[in-house]
Image: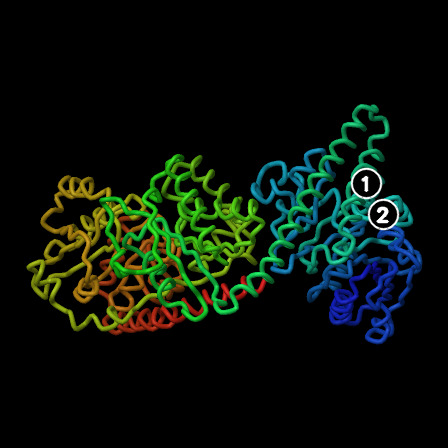
């Protein structure tokens, strides 16, 4: 038997969903359900028609959560009492799991389940008793959002210490959903009704713990909680009551505190209340300005209702981002979108892909200061130039690509929105990231913090692979899973699908016979690509196959070229390695390769692998970033091997030259039928996954969603 008490205030639409979930998952467990309504005005009586067994009591005024919950709890007699917010719904197996746990653990008085946001993110519902720092590092504070794993928040939010399976002791758990023994209520009493709303759950749990009872967070049972479903109807009062309850909790457990300390706490709470209120009114003002502007723009631009997209990329150097930007700039529906492209300049060592755009391309703006290199003065000038473009074109959406463009342009949009009361939407695409492999640990951590801050104001964050999204959400905590969408890259694959027509041209250019084994690597000669590992693997391969006629070709250029040429000399590899520089018709290269290599330390979605798969070239790569998604799941049992054969290619750990060399040998000697099947799977996969049309369709869908909000 269990008594379920739900306190409702103008959340009847949520309440109907809540009750439906309760009845759906109760099974054969006997239950009595009381709904204590605090003078709602949204037709709460409709629940009696949908759920006639629910006992509804309506108060003549809003008496607060604690008092209304007490009314409901006093009406029942079951050994267990469940308190549930109306804007929550229980998930499958909830009652069986949590009641079984209580029956098998008689020392536990109160249990809080796992509570999830709408997007599946786990809320920090199990916590330590509050301290003064909780105001700064609470569950939803700005500092915690920017620094989610800081030691103060981690110590305060005990959910972080849970593995998601095993129960843990907690100081207190959220009143959004809790199950308590009636014997515990008899011992410590009901909620303190001086708490109108907020913190009554913390006070109740503390009283239980002070009485020697145990409070536990039990993650095996779960509910989903629409945060603020009730309090949104009392925004100002909820803020007042929150801060009143904080002071009441402080005074209740610090009765001997000196007057000066009490005054200081009260002053601090008043300042916090004022800051939050000011921020709310600023946000309300900006939203109002947006509404007025939308009405005005609707009148002024009835003849041109296109969405204006300002697209910003740091530079159009050879690689996936430039190709990606070219597709989105030139292939969006021109009747619906007007795109302005803003780009910087490449360094003298980089290959240039600006040839993708004709010289007379009308909506392309060059900012010379927008470079890969970090420079405060140059970045400020970039922001000033972007600010002028924002005023000139008044875009609906600013979409940034690459880290430097993402930082300067998004920061500029934030300032622009605040100064002029605009609401320009922001989208940022992570083509890769600079959090690993580029800088030392301190600098990398700083970039992570900057991206977390910018993500707060960014309306949509785009990852180009599922693995990258997992990293951004689970490892670096850049944004919630709900905010990050996966939009794979899109390419014109036709030149690679038909590159067989070019077979022999590249070999002829190099003076190589058709029988020469040709293994190539395509990409910028920069540290993150780790070409040294490619050369080390080449040396090992040559040592294992001394009679092979083989050449290792390096396609690309960059800052590391001279160093790599010296490295070849040191390893006595010069007769076997060819530095080709950038090759514009790269399809001719793939037409003659026997295998493509990739040795990167970090990757988003490597273009060279997609091109090679389209061209039916076997791939050997390090298992980093988006490579995992491209290669697919491992085949067979290769747990003891230095490399792993996957659905669409062969991988080895990053930095393992021995494993890489063995993987190359496997590709060269593999059964022809098995290799042909893998190559065909890879080819079909990239045709389906990485087309231009799919990319354009995905992005147009995201733009339209932002335009409606």
Between the residue at mark 2 and the residue at mark 1, the CA separation in whole angstroms equals 9 Å
- Which image quarter: residue 503? bottom left
The reply to whether residue 217 is in sight is yes
Q: What residue is drawn where x is 37% and y is 62%?
A: 329
Of label 2 and label 1, which has the lower sequence position?
A: 2
Q: Is residue 121 left or right of residue 386?
A: right
Q: Position of residue 127 (x, y in %)?
A: 70, 44
Q: Position of residue 469 (x, y in %)?
A: 48, 56
Q: What residue is drawn where x is 80% and y is 35%?
A: 250
Q: Nearer the viewer, residue 67 or 294?
A: 294
Dot 2 crowding, Cα within 10 Å, few <14, some 14–19, many 20+: many
Q: Position of residue 367 (x, y in %)?
A: 34, 46
The disc label shown at residue 244, or none: 1
- Which image quarter: residue 130? top right
Dot 1 crowding, Cα within 10 Å, few <14, some 14–19, many 20+: many
Q: Nearer the viewer, residue 287 or 30?
A: 287
Q: In terms of secondary structure, where does tag 2 sit?
A: loop
Label 2 sits on residue: 196
Q: Is residue 336 left or right of residue 261?
A: left
Q: Is residue 464 left or right of residue 179?
A: left
Q: Residue furthest front?
A: 300
The disc label shown at residue 63, or none: none
Q: Quadrant of the N terminus?
A: bottom right
Q: How is the image coloured?
A: rainbow
Q: Position of residue 48 (x, y in %)?
A: 86, 73
Q: In terms of secondary structure, where does tag 1 sit?
A: helix
Q: Is residue 364 left or right of residue 65?
A: left
Q: Are marks 2 and 1 in contact (CB under 8 Å)?
A: yes
């Amino acid at each position: 038997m269990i008594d379920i008490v739900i306190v409702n205030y103008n959340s009847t639409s949520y309440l109907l969903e809540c009750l439906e979930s309760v009845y759906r998952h109760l099974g054969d467990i006997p239950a009595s359900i009381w709904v204590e309504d605090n003078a709602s005005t949204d037709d709460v009586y409709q629940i009696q028609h949908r759920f006639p067994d629910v006992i509804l009591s309506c108060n003549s005024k809003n008496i607060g959560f604690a008092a209304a919950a007490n009314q409901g709890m006093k009406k029942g007699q079951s050994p267990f009492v469940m308190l549930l917010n109306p804007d929550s719904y229980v998930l499958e197996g909830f009652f069986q799991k949590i009641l079984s746990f209580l029956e098998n653990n008689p020392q536990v008085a109160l249990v809080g389940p796992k509570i999830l946001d709408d997007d599946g993110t786990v809320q920090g519902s199990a916590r330590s008793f509050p301290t003064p720092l909780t105001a700064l590092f609470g569950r939803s504070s700005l500092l915690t959002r920017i620094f989610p794993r800081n030691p103060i928040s981690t110590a305060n939010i005990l959910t972080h210490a849970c593995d998601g399976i095993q129960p843990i002791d907690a100081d207190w758990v959220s009143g959004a959903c809790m199950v308590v023994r009636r014997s515990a209520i008899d011992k410590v009493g009901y909620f303190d009704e001086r708490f109108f709303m907020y913190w009554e759950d913390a006070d109740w749990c503390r009283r239980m713990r002070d009485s020697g009872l145990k409070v536990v967070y039990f993650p095996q049972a779960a509910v989903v909680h629409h945060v603020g479903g009730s309090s949104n109807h009392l925004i100002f009062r909820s803020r007042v009551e929150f801060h009143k309850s904080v002071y009441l909790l402080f005074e209740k457990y610090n009765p001997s505190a000196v007057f000066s300390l009490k005054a200081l706490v009260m002053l601090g709470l008043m300042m916090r209340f004022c800051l939050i209120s000011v921020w709310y009114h600023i946000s309300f003002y900006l939203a109002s300005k947006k509404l007025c502007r939308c009405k005005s723009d609707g009148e002024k631009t009835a003849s041109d209702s296109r969405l204006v997209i300002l697209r910003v990329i740091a530079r159009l150097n050879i690689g996936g981002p430039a190709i990606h930007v070219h597709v989105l700039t030139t292939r969006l529906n021109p009747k619906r979108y007007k795109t302005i492209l803003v780009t910087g300049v490449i360094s003298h060592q980089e290959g240039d892909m600006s040839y993708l755009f004709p010289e007379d391309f009308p909506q392309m703006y060059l900012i010379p200061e927008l470079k890969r290199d970090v420079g405060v003065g140059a970045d400020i000038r970039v922001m000033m130039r972007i600010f002028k473009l924002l005023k000139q074109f008044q875009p609906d959406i600013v979409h940034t690509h690459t880290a430097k463009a993402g930082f300067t342009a998004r920061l500029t949009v934030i300032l622009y929105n605040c100064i002029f009361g605009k609401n320009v939407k922001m989208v940022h695409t992570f083509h890769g990231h600079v959090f690993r492999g580029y800088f030392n640990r301190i600098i990398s951590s700083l970039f992570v913090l900057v991206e977390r801050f910018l993500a707060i104001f960014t309306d949509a964050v785009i990852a180009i692979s599922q693995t990258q999204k997992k990293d951004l959400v689970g490892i670096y905590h850049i944004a919630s899973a709900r905010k990050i969408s996966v939009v794979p890259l899109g390419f014109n694959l036709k030149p690679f699908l038909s590159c067989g027509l070019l077979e022999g041209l590249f070999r002829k250019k190099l003076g190589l016979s058709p029988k020469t084994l040709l293994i190539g690597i395509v990409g910028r000669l920069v540290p993150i690509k780790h070409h040294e590992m490619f050369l080390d693997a080449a040396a090992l391969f040559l040592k294992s196959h001394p009679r092979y006629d083989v050449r290792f070709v390096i396609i690309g250029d960059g800052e590391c070229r001279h160093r790599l040429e010296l490295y070849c000399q040191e390893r006595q590899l010069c007769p076997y390695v060819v530095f080709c520089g950038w090759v514009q018709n790269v399809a001719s290269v793939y037409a003659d390769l026997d295998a493509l290599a990739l040795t990167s330390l970090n990757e988003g979605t490597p273009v060279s692998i997609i091109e090679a798969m389209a061209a039916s070239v076997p791939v050997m790569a390090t298992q980093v970033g988006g490579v995992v998604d491209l290669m697919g799941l491992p085949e067979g049992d290769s747990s003891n091997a230095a490399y792993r054969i996957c659905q669409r290619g062969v991988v080895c750990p990053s930095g393992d030259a021995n494993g890489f060399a063995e993987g190359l040998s496997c590709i060269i000697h593999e059964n022809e039928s098995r290799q042909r099947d893998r190559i065909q799977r890879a080819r079909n996969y990239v045709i389906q996954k990485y087309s231009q049309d799919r990319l354009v369709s995905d992005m147009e869908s995201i733009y339209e969603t932002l335009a409606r909000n």
